[in-house]
Amino acid sequence: MTTQILDFDDEQIKELAKEIISKGHVVLHDQNLTQKQYAEVCNRIGDVETNNYFMNPKDNPEISLVSGLKDEAGNPIGVFGSSELQWHANGTGRHKFKEIIVSLYCVEECIDTVFSICSQVDCFAELSEADKKKYRTIDIELGWTEEAVYRPGVINDEPDISDQLGLQGELDIDGYKEDDDDRRPLVGKHPIDGREYLYFMASYIIGAFQHNERIALKPLYDELWKKLFKSKYMKHHVFRKGDLLFMDQLHTIHRRSPVKDTQRMLWRTALDYSNIQF
């Protein structure tokens, strides 16, 4: 019988959190969770972000629906519909955030859709010392652009809530410039394990600076793309019903291929590690 996360004791929850940080992501299979149970499980790891947007169930606002389904009036009920997604991570449009973990629980599957995760921390660890030194001197400028997460040419029919989401979070990531809210270092240091990682938010980078002087973005963008998005840093997953995935949003970045089955439904939470004593 598959071990259920609902039955985890405190030490098992702690070991799960440590595995998320060390490996970047963890998948538990054949889980059986209600929305309330899912939120409670995540709250054992840390504080869960709560919102009141169209994709948040009223009784369980910690959860966001990730689906292409629409209501009887033809309005989307979830985020990220059925479109192909560009590489991104939670909080990338806000620059400062505390919900380092994102979790996805599969309620209805689409076996033709592939979810991909790329390790930004493993990539940085294998860079040459010269590259590491150079990248530590670079800041990136992040900006919200319409349909930034969606692949070029994809039509997004979700409601525009960017003005509601805002650009501010709560955690000051190491090296963040308090006086310049749209800039942060290209290389970050994880607040828990201290490992350095690239923060290559491909969908949101609109500028770059080195030693506080603006530099050409495209050569840097192309260089980082070639270094990070290699198969050896990637893992690919096809969600099946009952799969529960946790990702560290500083150590990893993710994307998704198009969804063919419109019944596909994932539940999503964003949380921190605040309830774990490391």
Image (spheres, grey):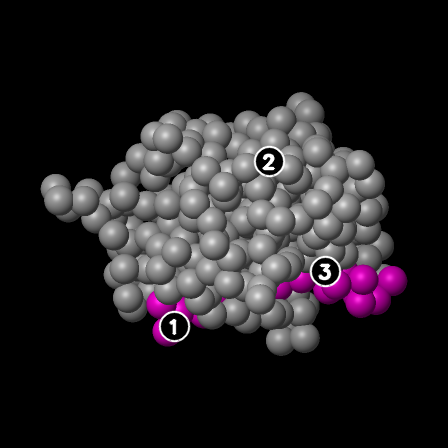
Q: Quadrant of residue 262?
A: bottom left
In this picture, residue 129 sits left or right of residue 232: right
Q: Position of residue 202 (x, y in %)?
A: 54, 55
Q: Residues within 10 Å of mark 3 (few under 14, many from 20)?
A: some
Considering the image in quadrants, where does the N terminus appear? bottom right
Secondary structure type for disc 2: helix
In 3D space, how far apart are the residues under numbered discs 2 and 3 (Cα atoms)?
21 Å
In this picture, residue 163 sits left or right of residue 180: left
Q: Residue at x 47, y 49 (%)?
A: 33
Residues in magenta, as a range: 110-129
Foreground pick, 46 / 53? 46
Foreground pick, 31 / 114? 31
In this picture, residue 73 sits left or right of residue 90: left
- 2 or 3: tag closer to the N-terminus: 3
Amino acid type shown at disc 2: Asn
Q: Residue 43 shows which numbered tag?
A: 2
Considering the image in quadrants, where does the C terminus appear? top right
Q: Residue at x 25, y 52 (%)?
A: 69
Q: Residue 23 shows which numbered tag?
A: 3
Q: Residues within 10 Å of mark 2 (few under 14, many from 20)?
A: some
What residue is pinned by disc 1? 111
Q: Nearer the viewer, mark 2 or mark 1?
A: 2
Q: Nearer the viewer, mark 2 or mark 3?
A: 2
Q: Quadrant of residue 263?
A: bottom left
Q: Is residue 113 magenta?
A: yes
- 1 or 3: tag closer to the N-terminus: 3
